[in-house]
Image (tube, helix red, strand yellow):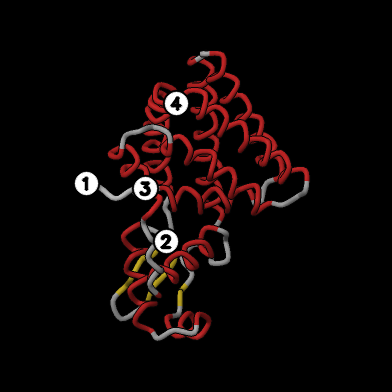
Amino acid sequence: MSVNRKMQIEQPKTLTEIVVERLREAIIDGHYKFGENISEDKLATAFGVSRSPVRDALNALQFTGLVSIKPKRGSFVFQPTAADVAEICDYRLMLEREALRLSMAADREGFLAALSGAVERMRERMQAGDEIGYVRIDTEFHNLFFDFCGNSLVQNAFDLVEARIATIRTALNARFKQRREDSFDQHVAIVEGLRNGDWKQVDEVLSKHITSIRSDAIDELSRA
């Protein structure tokens, strides 16, 4: 007999897991820039831990693509090329289209309620001028596609690029106020299209949304 999940005791997180979470959040929120060196010694001091969990955390983040470890040189935040951005955005569009359809089939009302709630919180953060808060909820909005899809393989496929997508999103939204406003309108249109069963609108808006991110990111990289 399986144990009821509500009765299971949540295991405390290891030092490595804590460092992974905090460093991942710092990179996604833009506290580290693309290509920036990440000092093991400084992280260990900041977190009050030895270098061992820091090193393990960096190895874990390398697996997600957020960190690049170069022998005899150190660890660095990933530095996407224009080709990388193009591939990530194409991959993302393909997955998000499918995840939307799966989520609407699995739990239409619950999914729409979650998306609508995220949109309202995005509106609040945008009106408050909270750039980081807006981007975090923007990320949550898109992650909902996979939270509700009911397909672990699709979820795992998205996990391969989710952190890099979030980091690129932060870099763009933090610099362009107009991009945030356009992005917000597109999120509203996606939810409206889903609610009305207008898949043509959903596909067109989602494609425009991701294509604009791709174009803006490539433009920014060309100026760097």
Front label number (1 vs 4): 1
118 over 20 or under it: above or below:
above
Q: Left of 53 or right of it: where is 23?
A: right
Q: Earlier in the sequence, mark 4 or mark 2?
A: 2
Where disc 2 sits, the SS reads loop
- How far is the residue under mark 1 from the one under mark 3? 31 Å
Q: Which mark is residue 185?
A: none
Check contact, mark 3 vs mark 2: CB within 8 A.
no
The local crowd at label 1, few if under 14, some if 14 to 19, many if 20 or more residues have their Cα within 10 Å, is: few
Q: Earlier in the sequence, mark 1 or mark 4?
A: 1
Asked where in the image residue 132 lies, by quadrant, the reply is: bottom right
Residue 13, percent across and down? Answer: 40, 68
- How far is the residue under mark 1 from the one under mark 4? 28 Å
Amino acid of disc 1:
Met
Q: Which mark is residue 107?
A: 4
- How far is the residue under mark 2 from the one under mark 1? 45 Å
- How far is the residue under mark 3 from the one under mark 2? 16 Å
Front label number (3 vs 4): 4
- How far is the residue under mark 3 from the one under mark 4? 21 Å
Report which residue position mark 2 lands on: 78
Q: Earlier in the sequence, mark 2 or mark 1?
A: 1
Q: Left of 5 or right of it: where is 200?
A: right
24 over 70 or under it: above or below:
above
Report which residue position mark 1 lands on: 1
Residue at the image point whose x is 39% and y is 32% from the top? 149
The local crowd at label 3, few if under 14, some if 14 to 19, many if 20 or more residues have their Cα within 10 Å, is: some
Residue 43, percent across and down? Answer: 48, 79
Q: Earlier in the sequence, mark 1 or mark 3?
A: 1
Q: Earlier in the sequence, mark 3 or mark 2?
A: 2
The local crowd at label 4, few if under 14, some if 14 to 19, many if 20 or more residues have their Cα within 10 Å, is: few
Report which residue position mark 3 lands on: 159
